[in-house]
Amino acid sequence: MSAMKHCLLVSISLFTLLLDGQSQSVSAADSPIVFNRDIRPILNDRCLACHGPDEKQRQADLRLDVRKLAVEAAIVPGQSAKSDLIARITSQDADIQMPPADSKQKPLSKDEIDLLRRWIDEGAKYQTHWAFIAPERPVAPAIQNKNWGRNPIDSFVLANLEKEGLTPSGEADRPTLIRRASLDLTGLPPSPQAVKEFVNDTSANAWEKAIERLLKSERYGEHLARYWLDAARYADTNGYQYDLEREQWVWRDWLIHAFNSNMPFDQFTIEQLAGDLLPNATDQQRLATAFHRNHPITIEGGVIDEEYRTEYVIDRVVTTSTVWMGMTMVCGRCHDHKYDPISQKEFYQFFAFFNQVPERGNNGFAPKINVASPLTTRRQQRINNQIAEAEQRLKKHPALSEKKLIEWERRLTNVVTNQWSVVVPATRVSQGGATLEVQADKSILATGKNPATETYELILQPNTSAVHAIRLEALKHPSFVGGGTGRGSNGNFVLSEIEFAAATKSTPDKFEPVKVASAEADYSQANYNIKLAIDGKIDRTGWAVDGNTKFEDRVAVFTFAKPLLADDVAQLRIRLHHRYGGSHHIGRFRLAIAAQPVQEVPPDVAGIVQTAAANRTTAQRERLTEVLLERFGPKEVQAATANLRSLRNQRAALTRTPATMVMTDRAAPRTTHVLYRGEYDKPREEVTSGVPAVFPSLPDGIPANRLALARWLVSANHPLTARVTVNRYWQQLFCTGMVKTTEDFGSQGEYPVHPELLDWLAVEFVKSGWDVKGLLKKMMLSATYRQSSRVTKESYERDPDNRLLARGPGYRLDAEVIRDSALKVSGLLVDRLGGPSVFPYHPPGLWQEINNRPGYSRTYKQDANENIYRRSLYTFWKRTVPPPSMATFDAPQREYCVVRRSRTNTPLQAFVMLHDPQFVEAARQLGKRMMTEGGKTVDDRIAYGFQLCTARRPNAAERTVLKQMFDKRLRQYQADKKSAARLLSVGDSPTDETLDAAEFAAWATIGRVLLNLSEFVTKG
Amino acid sequence: MTDPILESHLQVNRRHFFGRSASGIGAMALASIMNPQLFAADKKLAENNGPGYAPGAVGPTHFAPKAKRVIYLFQSGAPSQIDTFDHKPTLEKLDGKNLPDSIRGGQRLTGMTSGQKAFPAAKSFMPFRQHGNSGQWISDLLPWHAKIADEMCIVRSMYTEAINHDPAMTFFQTGHQQPGRPSLGAWASYGLGSESDSLPAFVVLLNKNTDQQAQPLYARLWGSAFLPSNHQGVKLRSSGDPVLYLNDPTGAKLPDRRKLLDGISKLNALRQAEVGDPEIATRIAAYEMAYRMQMSVPELTEISDEPKSTFDLYGPDAKVPGSHAANCLLARRLIERGVRFVQLYHRGWDHHSNLPGRHPLIAKEVDQGSAALVLDLKRRGLLKDTLVVWGGEFGRTVYKQGSGTRFGRDHHPRCFSMWMAGGGIKGGMTYGETDDWGYNIVDRENTGVHVHDLNATILHLLGINHQRLSYRFQGLDFRLTGVEDHGPVRALLA
C-alpha cells in the first residue's frame, strides 16, 4: 500500500487522486497518448523487471522496452485486440495473466489497461526517455491571457494553468516580496530599512534592483553554499563508528567564494571534479577537488582496506551521478540497471574515473594539501606588505651585519649542539620479537613482528661526563600507516611508560631505578599527556600524539631528578613500554643525552640550527634570524623583532589552514574490474573508464580521466546536467522541482510538470555561460515567482502541492534559515565570512551519550565567544550526532549526498523554537530591540518587533492579542521578579541591566511569541 | 483550550504528528476533515485504520498482527554465543585444538586476528544447564534468563554479512551495511503510524557505558534516511532533558506555558484565516501535542509510582538512570503508553581480550533487567502482544584472540544466537544448530536465520508483509529486507 502512496503519479494530471491502492490515470482521455508520460511509467512499474534491460532477470526472452523486440513478440501496432500484451494483462486465467500473481506486482488497473490499449491502437509509438534527449529551446507557448506575465517563464506556466482552467494569483504585497527574495538569496530576513527602501521605491525596476542588491551580498554565497554542503556530504568529522574530527572547512570557504564570485557552473563543476588535472592547476583549483574527499572515512580497527576503499569510490559515483545527472547509477553496482539503460559494466567504467586516488580504506586521509582559504587573500596581502616594510627597516639597522649574525648563530649552535649528543644503544631488544635496526641517522627502526603490545629494552653506555636528561624523538617512516610515527593499525602510538635504570661500574649487572623529575613533549594528544608516561603505571594510558591524524615527528625530554655522573654509571637501561594494544608502538625513534643542564632553546630552533644552512627553508631562516636578534641584539632591535614576529604570527594564523584532503590520480593507474554483486573481493572482467553508451560519448584523443568526465558533464550536448541543475535551483525557490524527484531523472523519476519550461531554462542557462546568479534572477523576475502565496479553497482543492504554480511559493524554511533568522532579528548575528567551524549552544553531554568510546571520543566544547552567533552553515557538523535542533528541522546527517530534504512538521520542532536556549536568548535580545529601537508606545514597539520577524506590520486583531499578552505579562513579572530574572538569564550574551527587569522580561516574552509564529518559520 | 476554532482544528489534528509529514498527507488529512468529500482517498485511509488510530502507510496492517509493539534490547559489541546460548558439549574435546581450515572455509577475518598464527578453540568458560519445563540450555553467565527459559525462543542459527561493528550494526538496524537506509523502528513508525497522542511512535534508549571499550553509536541507527524525518527515533535521555528541549529553560510554570501557547495559537489562527495555508493549522496542532508531551514525559520517567515489587523484580539498578535495568523498566512504561517501538542499546560486549573476566561484568548488568522485563510484561498481560528481541550485531569466534586464560574472542558473522519472546513467538524452544566447532550453521540453507529473515519476522509479527512495506526513492521501491530471497521464519511463530 505504501507503494501506492509513493509511487509516482502515472499521469501528468496533478489532480488524480490515488484510491485504494490503484494508481488511476484519468488524464488525457481526449488527448493523444504520450509514451514518456503515459506508458513508460506503467511498463517500468509492472513489466520491465522481467521484460526489461536486465538480461539476467529476463523471462520468456521478451523485452518490452525496445519497440522492435516488443512488436515481434507481443504488440501488434494499431490493433490492441490482436496484441498478446493486452490479452495477457486482461486474462483471468492465472497461468496466462500478467503480471503473474506471484510476482509481487499489483495487477493493472482498468485505466492503465485502457491507456495501453489506446497506445497500441494509436500505433504503439515509443519514445526515447525524455531526459536522455538533449534539450532544445522550445518556443514559448500561446496563451490567452496576455495581461499576465513578465518573462517567458510565465508563458509556460500560464499555458499549463489555462489548460487546467486555473488562473494565477495576484502579486504579493511588497513586504512579502522583499522578505521572500531576501530569504531565497541570502537565507536571512530583510532589515526594516531594506523593507522600507523597497516599499518606497517607485521606479519601474525596483524589484530588479532589489534582487541585484541581494545577489551582491556576501550572505548570498553563504546561503547558496549551504545547499551544496548537503549534496557534497560535507561534515567536520569522519563518520562511521569512531567519528573523530577532520578539517575540510577551507574547501567550504572555497565554495562560499565560488558562489559569491558567481563562478560559472561549468567551471564550478570542472574544478570540483577535476581541478587537480587542469593544465597548470592552481592551488585553489586543487582545493576545489576536496568535494570528492568529503565522504566518510573509517578508522575502525578491524576493517579490510579494500572493502572501504571501494565504498569511497562508489560514494563518488553515487554523488556525481546524483548531483550532475540525476541518475541512480548505483543500481548498476550489483547488476544491470533494471529501468535505465546502464549496464553493470558501464557502472564500473564510470567507477574507474574515481578509482585512481592514491588512498587507503582504513585511515584513508591522504592525499592532503595545505592551501590557504580564498577568503583570506586580501588580508594576507595587507599583512605581507607590513612585514616587508618591517623587514626592510630591520635589515637597514646599523647595529646589524652579516658578520654579527654569523657570530650569534655560532653561539646559539654551541648551546644546542653541546646540549644533546645522539647515542646509539649498545643493545636493543624487542620483547615482542620485532627487529630493531640502526639507521644511517642513528635512529632505530622497528620492523618485522608487530604484536599487540610491546616493550623495547635499550642499554646505553653514556660517554658524556654526566646525564642530566634524555631526549626521545619519535620519527616518521613510510612503512607506517599514513607515513607517521607509530606502528599502530591507525598510525598512532601510545607510550605507556618509559623507565630508566642505571647500573654502576662496581655492579654493572644491578640496575637501580632512576627518578625522572619532569617530562615535556612538543605535542600530547588530549587525555594522553606525556606525564602519563612517567606515572609509574605500565597500563593502557600513556603518551600519544594523534598519530592517526597528524603525521609529524615528535620529541619528548625527560629530565632526571639528579644527574647521573659518568664516573659512577656504566650503563643506562631504558624501557619503552607499549600496553595500549593494537600495536600502538613507536616505530622509529632516536635517543640523545644532555650532559649539561638543559637550556631553554625552543625545540624547533634547535632543529633549525642542526640543519645545514643550505637546506633551511625560508621560514626556517626567518625564524632563526628572529631568535638570534631577540636573544643577542641591542634593545631596539629586539623590539623591532618582536613587532615583526607579531606580524608574522598574524600571517601564520591567517594561513594556518589545516591540510585539506584533495583528489589526485596515482602515477601508475589502478586496474578496475567489474565487481560481482558489487563486492570488493569478487573482481571479474577488467574495464577502463568510460561513460554509459546511452549518453553522448567522450571525445576521442584525450585521456578518459576525471577531467574528461567533468568537461563531458558540462558539454553543450549533455542531456542532463543543465536540466538537473536548473531543476535544483527551481526547487530552492519553489519548494518542489519541476521534476519532483530531484535525484532521479531516469525513467523511474517523475515526468516534469512543466517539461518545456524546464528545457527552456536549461538551454538558456547554458547559453548564459552557466550563470547561476543570472538564472536565479530570471526565475525571480517572473510573475510566477511574484504571486501571492495565499491559499484559496479552490486552488488548494485543485492543486494541494502547488505544482502548477497558480500561487506563489510558501513553505516552511530550512533549519539553518530559521536559526539564522532568529539571530538576525535579535541583532545577535555575527556575519563574519568563512573560517573554521564553530560550536554554538548544544545540549550538554549529547556527543558522549551517543558516540562515545571512553577515553577516545571528545566532548562538545561550546564556544565562549561570538562564534555562538555565527551563521548555521559554520556550525560544527558531527555525522553521528548532527546538530540536534537542525536535525529536528529535517537537516540530513551528511553521511551521503542529499539533494532534497524532507519537510516535516512535528512537536519536537515546537520544543526547539520554544526552549532551545538559542531561541530563548534571541527572544530576549529581540525584546530589547523592541524596547530600545521600537519607539515609545507599546503599539509601536509591538509593530517594530512584528515587522522585524515578518516584514509586515501587525493588523488590529494581532496587535490586540499581543498587547493583552504584554500587559498581563508585565503585571505578572512585576509581581514575580524572580521569574523575570530567570528568563533574562538564558544565553551567554549580557543582559541590559539598565532596563527595568519586569518590562524587559515582558518584552522578551513577546519576542518568544513572535519567533514562534508560523509566519516566522515560513516563506510566505 | 477555549477558542472554538482552534479546538476544532485540534480535534482534527491531534493524532497526526509523529506519523505524518507536514506538507503531504498530514495537511491533506486536515483539509479532508474540513471538506470530507474532496479527499475521499485520505478519508478512506482513516476509516480503514479505525477510530482514534493514526494511520501509517500500511492501513491498518497487511494481516492481523500478533505483536502490537516491539522492545528491542540490542546487545551492541556482540555477546559471545559460545558462552551464553549455544551449548556445545563437543568443544570439551576440541578445546585448545586449532580450528581446521576445512571448518573455517575461507571465512574472511577482521584486521585484528587475520595475522594470528594459530586459532585454538576455547570452550565456554561457563557451565551450561537446562532450565524450565522446556529444558532450554542457558549458561550460568545469565542466571536470570533461566527464569524465562519457557518464554524465550533461542535462535542459534543467526548469521550476518558484516565482520566489523559499524557495518554490522548498520546492517542489523537498516538492512544495509552502508549509511543511507531507514532504521527498523522508522519503518515500523512509517508503516504503522502512532498509537499515542502525546508520545512518539519510536523511542530510543541508550544505556550508560561501563565497559572501557564500549561501542560508540551513531544517529543513523535510529534514523529515517529517505523516509520523512518525523519517523526517526526520538531519544529518551537519562540525564538532562529527557527529550531534547522538552523543558523550558526559563523555568516557566505550566499555566504560563499554557498562556504562551494560547497566544501563539491565537495569532497563528488569525493568520490562517487570512492566508488559508492549511500548514498553519498543522503547526498549531503540533504545538498542542508538544504541550501534551511536556506533561506526559515527566509522568513517564517518574518511576516513584512503581510498587516495591517492580524494584524487587528489576533489581536495585532500576533506580539508577541509564542503567540497563532502568531502561528495561522505562521500555515497559513506554509501551504501556502507546509507544510502538522501543529500541534500547547496551554497548559493552566487545571483548577482544580477557573475555572470561569482562563478559561476566556485562552479563550482570544485562541479565536481570532483560529477564525482569519479560516477566513483568507477562504478569501484566502485555507479553502476549509485545515482542521482545535480544541480541548483538554478530557473534564471537570459537577460537581465541590472544592466548592463555585472559583470551578474547574476535567478531564472528557465520553463526550466533539471539532470543525473542512474546507477541506471536513460540516460547521455550531452541532453533537452529551449529557444527561441532560452533563455527558454522548446520544446514544453513534450511535453518539459517539471516538478518533480513529476522527483520522480516519482526515485521510479520507486527502484521506487515516485509515485501510490501516499501518506499519509492531514487526510482526504486526500497525495503528494509532488501531484494534477496528472505522472509519470516515460520518455525519461530506460535
Image (spheres, rainbow, N blue to C red):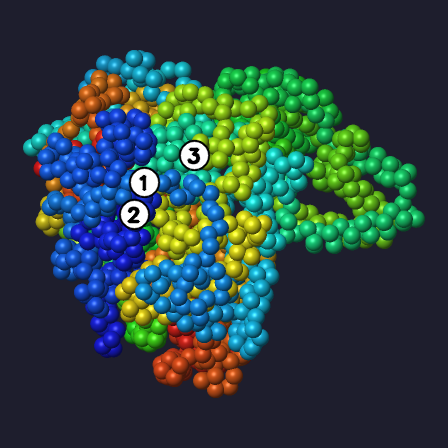
Can residue B108 be seen?
A: yes
Q: Are marks 3 and 2 in contact (CB under 8 Å)?
A: no
Task: Tell me the subunit letter for badge 2.
Answer: A
Q: Amino acid at mark 2?
A: Ile
Name the amino acid type tagged 3. Answer: Val
Q: Which residue is mark 1?
A: A125
The extreme bottom residue here reads A937
Of tags 3 and 2, the one toward the viewer is: 2
Residue type marked 1 = Lys
Q: What is the chain letter for disc 1?
A: A
Q: Chain of mark 3?
A: A
**Label drawn at residue A694:** 3
| Residue under pointer 2 | A33
Q: Nearer the viewer, residue A730 or B429?
A: A730
Most distant residue in the front direction? A78
Q: Which numbered disc flags the more N-terminal residue, 3 or 2?
A: 2
